[in-house]
Structures are given as structure tokens and as C-alpha cells.
Image (cartoon, grey):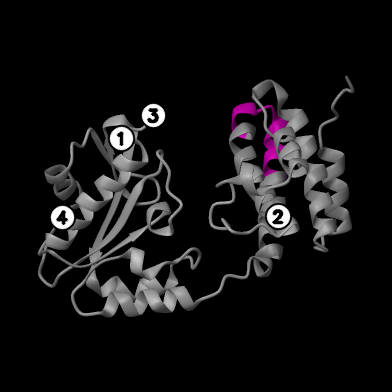
Amino acid sequence: MTTGGLAGLLALDAQLRAALQAEGGFSHVAAYGSVPQGQADAHSDLEYWAFLAPGAAVEAQDWLSTQLDVQHFVVNEFGTPTALLPGLRRVELHVVPAARLPEVEDWTPQHVRPTQMLVKDEDGRLARHLAVLAGRTVHPADDAGLILGRLLNWLAFGLNVLARGERVRAHELLGWVQGGLLRLARLQEKRTDHWPNPSRRAEQELSVASLTRYAGITAGLPDLERAYAGAVTWTLDLADELRLTVPLALARDLRERAPSVPRT
């Protein structure tokens, strides 16, 4: 259990919000993620964007270390400065120039609650950008063709390296295949509440049928043939149900390359 549970998380959020407000080097601060969305639980992270005041120089690692018991700090693969606290609690803090404030309008506009996100706003600009963000609408169905196209690419890539005998690499690529299939399954079921992260709350939001098919495309190294065979079938089924086009020759190649799985 993460230290302090949900109450501890919310207390830590309040502590950090107060410290971020008091920091003179920050002119604007926004919180994001599950806490301002009202969807946090005992295992959630805390996530913030801090925009530097003119002439200020604040480093995320140094600032977090003065406020918290930081056990480990890293800039992750996506460029996010992240601190690990006792109990595996995670805190993310982006520190960027205030010139990047307009980028707020381009954040993913789902579950946007400007009042809960606004931590510090010296001149009202952050509130205006958050209002624009909240007014934007996501249309996941518009991305269906792109998602299928990317899925077909990852599926072909994985099938090829599996045929070559690179099982570890095929296992890695299977994750990209799974992500694409989760998105298409959400579209098919019209359950796109967590579109930016399709695995979030999948157990609560997707049907038993979809979860069963998803389980069939998970595998350890010995079971990759079964997973990839299931992924080919589910991809073509979802494309058909969503009325998306897979070229006949490509569909034939996928079926032919799909591993044969002995019946048990």
C-alpha cells in the first residue's frame, strides 16, 4: 500500500500546492492527472506543470528535494522529471519557461477541470488557457483509421521478428499491438472516457468479451504464437466491425503469417 493511502496523497497534494504557490520562481502552476480529475486513489501520482517567472532559474530536482523526502529522481523516457518518495509515491514536476503557457491549450482535452487544475496564476493567463482547453472536444472516432494503420504496422513488425526467431523482440512489440487493439476495442464499445491511456480502468469500462479477447493476446515468451494469432484475428474482426478498410492482400498476408496454434 502506498504510504498514507488516499488521504495521505491528498494531504501531500495540498502541501505541494502551497509550496508551489509560495515559490517566487514560478509565475503559473497547473496540476494535471487523476487528482484534479477527481479520479485519484491510494496508488495515484501527483503531477504538476510549473512555469518560470521572468529571469527565474529553478531546477525540478533541486526544488523537489527541498520539499520532499526524495529517494530517487529521474527524467523518464518522455522527458518528465519524476521523484520517487517513500512507499513508491511518484511526483512529476515539469519546469518550463512561461513562454510555453499557450501549449496548455494543446493538452489532451479530457476530464479537464480548470478550477481544480489551477494552482498559481499571477496574471490570469493560465486560467484563460485552461478555459480554452476545457472547451475543446475530443473525437476519438476521427483517429480510427490512423490507429488501425499503426496497429497493422506493429502487427506486421512483430510477426516478422517472431518468424525470425527473435522472441524477446516479438514480445516487446506485442505491447504496441495490445495498445492499438485496446483503442479499437474502446471505439467499438463506445467507451472512450480514458482515450489518452486506453489501459486505464479497462477492467471497469470494457466488456467481458473484450477483456477475454485481450487476455488471449497476452503471453509469455513460450506463448507468443497464440498471442499473435489472436491479435491478427481480433484486428481484422475489429476493423470489420468499425467498417475500417484493410486491403485484401494485406489481410491475406496477415492470416497466412499468423502462427498456427494447435487445438487443445
Q: Does label 3 or label 2 sit earlier along the sequence?
A: 3
- Residue 217 to residue 66: above or below: above
* Labels 3, 2: front one: 3
Q: CA distance from mark 3 to mark 2?
A: 33 Å
* Labels 2, 4: front one: 4
Q: Main secondary structure of the magenta part?
A: helix
Residue type pointed to by label 1: Gly
Outermost residue on the front side: it is 7
| Residue that badge 4 annotates | 19
- Identify the element where label 4 is drawn: helix
* Labels 1, 2: front one: 1
| Residue that badge 2 annotates | 184
Q: CA distance from mark 2 to mark 4?
A: 42 Å
| Residue that badge 1 annotates | 4
Q: Does label 1 or label 2 sit earlier along the sequence?
A: 1
Picture coordinates of residue 165 (x, y %)?
A: 69, 27
- Residue 71 to residue 64: above or below: above
Where residue 53 sits, quadrant-wise, is bottom left
Q: What residue is drawn where x is 77% and y is 49%? A: 235
Q: Nearer the viewer, residue 166 or 118?
A: 118
Q: What residue is drawn where x is 48% and y is 65%? A: 108
Q: CA distance from mark 1 to mark 3?
A: 8 Å
* Labels 4, 1: front one: 1
| Residue that badge 3 annotates | 1
Q: Is residue 46 left or right of residue 195?
A: left
